[in-house]
Image (cartoon, rainbow, N blue to C red):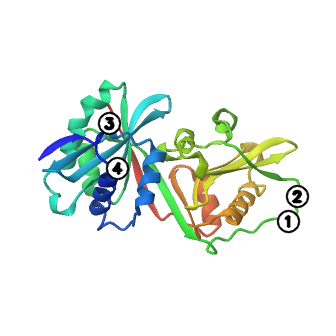
Amino acid sequence: MTIKSLEDVDFNRIVSAFLRAFSDYDVIFSAEDIYEMCKRRGFDPALSFAAFDKDEIVAFTLNGKGSFNGKEMAYDTGTATVKEYRGRGLAAQIFKHSIPFLKDTGITHYILEVLQHNIPAISIYENVGFKITREFNYFSWKEGMMRNEINNSRKQWDVREISLPSQVEVQNFWDFNPSWQNGFESVERSRERFVSLAVYADEMLVGYAIFEPASGDITQLAVHPNFRREGIASYLLSEMEKRNQSGKFKVINTETSCTSITGFLESKGIAPAGQQYEMMKEL
């Protein structure tokens, strides 16, 4: 058994190992899903590592690299072990092996998200020094499940498809900072897959949404604090419904402490489907 980087490993082999390791999980991935996920999250094969049994990948951590909240960070895009090799501590060994390589590139922090009910994974992360930094909700629903009544008197709202808004322009709309996969840097990596919608009142930007029509992933949805409770977010949802191609929607990684987004979605009949932890390790 050896641990080494994935820098010179064909991506198709990585996909095959990923599909095998996640074959008994609730979430079903396709090869295209894995490719798009890795691209968006900044996957760097030189900073990603796997345990090999002879020439076979049996456990891995796929890492992304980028700037997050002003710090150079690595992001755990996916960690898993093939079922037959679990219980041997391979994930922890891979993490420990990778740290010196991450530090050598100037990375100062290591961040990840994990489902709160995945107790074995949380235990591994805590044992190698990760600490919980935030708690997230995630939501998912099929088209037709959401109650979204639009007030037809709101004719003053001008909705446009735009290129991505600047973070500086919309940051004061936020009640919390987006997670790694929902941040502007991640969206920019797969910009061609996203649609950005903006709502204007007298040429002033008052609300916006960024979403991926192919998956129904609503990555960002925010309204200026002075224009809330006027139907803008509902209007944006209705416009996304018109453009959605997947038949479903999901909103991932909203802070549990943010009662505004939770209350808004619950008013539409959409309750949280589960929770995640954001965890971080200082290198």
Q: Earlier in the sequence, mark 4 or mark 1?
A: 4
Relative placement, left or right, of 32 versus 243 is left
Alpha carbon separation for disc pair 4 and 2:
50 Å
Specify the amino acid type for callout 2.
Lys
Q: Earlier in the sequence, mark 3 or mark 1?
A: 3
Specify the amino acid type for callout 4.
Phe
Relative placement, left or right, of 91 versus 196 is left
The location of residue 57, given as percent across then percent down, is 22, 52
The residue mark sitting in front, 4 or 3, is 4
Alpha carbon separation for disc pair 4 and 1:
50 Å
The residue indicated by pointer 1 is: 152
- Compare residues 87 and 245 and report the one nearer the observer: 245
The residue mark sitting in front, 3 or 1, is 3
The residue indicated by pointer 4 is: 11
Crowdedness near tag 3: few (<14), some (14–19) or many (≥20) residues, C-alpha within 10 Å: some
Q: Residue at x 62, y 72 (%)?
A: 143
Q: Tag 2's secondary structure? A: loop
Q: Are marks 4 and 1 in contact (CB under 8 Å)?
A: no
Specify the amino acid type for callout 3.
Ala
Q: Residue at x 72, y 64 (%)?
A: 238
The residue mark sitting in front, 2 or 3, is 3
The residue indicated by pointer 3 is: 46
The residue indicated by pointer 2 is: 155
Alpha carbon separation for disc pair 3 and 1:
53 Å
Alpha carbon separation for disc pair 1 and 2:
7 Å
The residue mark sitting in front, 4 or 2, is 4
**Residue 92 falls in image quadrant:** top left
Q: Tag 3's secondary structure? A: helix
Q: Residue at x 45, y 58 (%)?
A: 33
The residue mark sitting in front, 4 or 1, is 4
